[in-house]
Image (tube, coloured by chain):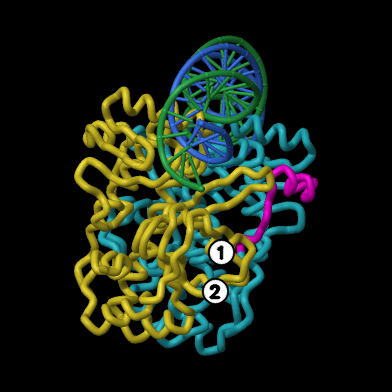
Chain colours: A yellow, B cyan, C blue, D green
Amino acid sequence: MSNRFLDKLLTFGTLDAETASAVEAATSQPRSLPAKHDLIREGDRPGPVFVVLEGWACRYKILPSGTRQILAFLMPGDCCDLHIGLLAEMDHGIQTVTSARVATISRELMDELMDHHPSFERAMYITQLVDEGTMRSWITSMGRRTSIERVAHLMCELYLRGRHIGLSDAPHFALPLSQIMLADALGMTPVHLNRVLKELRLHGAMALKRGSLSITDPAKLTRIAGFDDNYLHRHLRGAG
Amino acid sequence: MSNRFLDKLLTFGTLDAETASAVEAATSQPRSLPAKHDLIREGDRPGPVFVVLEGWACRYKILPSGTRQILAFLMPGDCCDLHIGLLAEMDHGIQTVTSARVATISRELMDELMDHHPSFERAMYITQLVDEGTMRSWITSMGRRTSIERVAHLMCELYLRGRHIGLSDAPHFALPLSQIMLADALGMTPVHLNRVLKELRLHGAMALKRGSLSITDPAKLTRIAGFDDNYLHRHLRGAG
DNA sequence: CGTAGAATTGATGATGGTCAACGTTAGTGG
DNA sequence: CCACTAACGTTGACCATCATCAATTCTACG
């Protein structure tokens, strides 16, 4: 079985054979976890770096009122912050969304990989920049986009990210997120999200049904979202 | 004149004398810039790392509709992303808010500093983790806090950040941000922000007037905001 | 087949946006 | 020193969006 983490890193630059096998070795003992399993909670002392090899996870925060804000979705190949081990305390939790296979890389091993494999180091820095760009894009969505734009924008993002790692089968995409999850990510209520999804369906832009996203009119969806994929940084700077 | 960048790094761990002087040397030739000056725009090819030594700046995005979302405020001592030079294109712009003194550190010099000064490297990674935590906190605010909570939360954040770097004079704090700027950061209209500020004033929690924030009742403000400072990561893990 | 969680729909109201007017302040040049 | 200006701040009236509450239907799964 291929290694999704390695596959993702390879989209940000070539890795020599030795580096690739070191990365594979570092993630060769994943744990299989059920859905809704906390990898780590807000307030916990961080330990190793988590790498999601199969399945989906999310970063989240719970407010005093009990409401939840989802901060990011982690798809196969995604990982948590590189230097998380420098902190005394997590400022958010990370939880599986579906059942998942998750590897951990200890701080020591991570340091060693980074020191001895510059192409790995470079790819990790780029993934981090993409994650930051994604957070900025979410802030922009929440602050300045209407609900239909916001929903369309997230769908564009998830679809493209899925395509980049080979998860999508043309206009269809397996999206294992309930409307409740999506609403918690988008800063709206499930009820309103449901109505917005209906509107997008009636527009003929996209249809979401229980675990599967169909993009019926990509151009229209992109136009509604005002989507610009620049923050995913698929075009990188040449070596140097 | 002290070096705000160095001061900030020192709050994240000690730096030996040689490292401190290398950091000072790297930022010893700042440019003086007027307010509202773009350091770099969305779409530009990134170059050196920017370090704000005096004055304020902000990260921002402009939407197709022309509206602006401010993504972060950079106070004296703050800098832009460490590895920004790996990207082909900026996904957001950075602009001065006030007149400012801004140093640049070339990618080569930054690499050299990181390689030869592990305590600097560590402090830079922590600043980045704090910046990420701040973005997550903003996402949470925009998604799940009411406007009054959101305003109160940002004021708590800015006040605390100011205090950490010695900018604040007890309950007063020089906050050089117009209501328009704050509204663009908070995802609301200036009109509504104005009403919320009035409400906070009437509550006796805080008062903002032209460039100066007075926190009249810190406990009340914190309570309204539901503020938890954990994402600023002032408590760090012991060395190791 | 029964149950729990998720999705869907309707009715109603609060929050916050829009439009428009006016007051205030700081900076500029006569 | 004062008049002028432009940007910012403040307030009111009105309306759109989205949350809330509640009921019903759908779907997966034991």
User: Is residue A40 toward the left or the right of residue A228 in the image?
Assistant: right
Magenta region: which residues? Answer: B215-232
State whether residue D8 is above or below residue B108.
above
Give the residue drawn at x 23%, y 70%. Answer: A13
Tell me the amino acid under the disc marked 1. Ile
Q: Which residue corresponds to mark 2?
A: A47
Q: Secondary structure at mark 2?
A: loop
The residue closer to the viewer here, B174 or A202, is: A202
Give the residue drawn at x 26%, y 37%. Answer: A215
The residue closer to the viewer here, B4 or A76, is: A76
Q: Main secondary structure of the magenta part?
A: helix
- Other residues around mark 1 within 10 Å, as few (<14) / some (14–19) / many (≥20): some
State whether residue A232 is above or below residue C27.
below
Instruction: Report if residue A182 is visible in the image.
Output: yes
What is the number of the mark on residue A40?
1
Counting from the top left corner in percent of width and height, residue B101 is at 48, 63
- Other residues around mark 2 within 10 Å, as few (<14) / some (14–19) / many (≥20): some
Counting from the top left corner in percent of width and height, residue B179 is at 57, 38
User: Is residue B133 toward the left or the right of residue A205 in the image?
Assistant: right
Give the residue drawn at x 66%, y 58%. Answer: B229
Counting from the top left corner in percent of width and height, residue A90 is at 59, 64
Counting from the top left corner in percent of width and height, residue B232 is at 61, 62
Which image quadrant is residue C21 in? Answer: top right
State whether residue A226 is above or below residue A234.
above
Instruction: Report if residue B135 is visible in the image.
Output: no
The residue closer to the viewer here, B97 or B156, is: B156
Which image quadrant is residue A77 in? Answer: bottom left
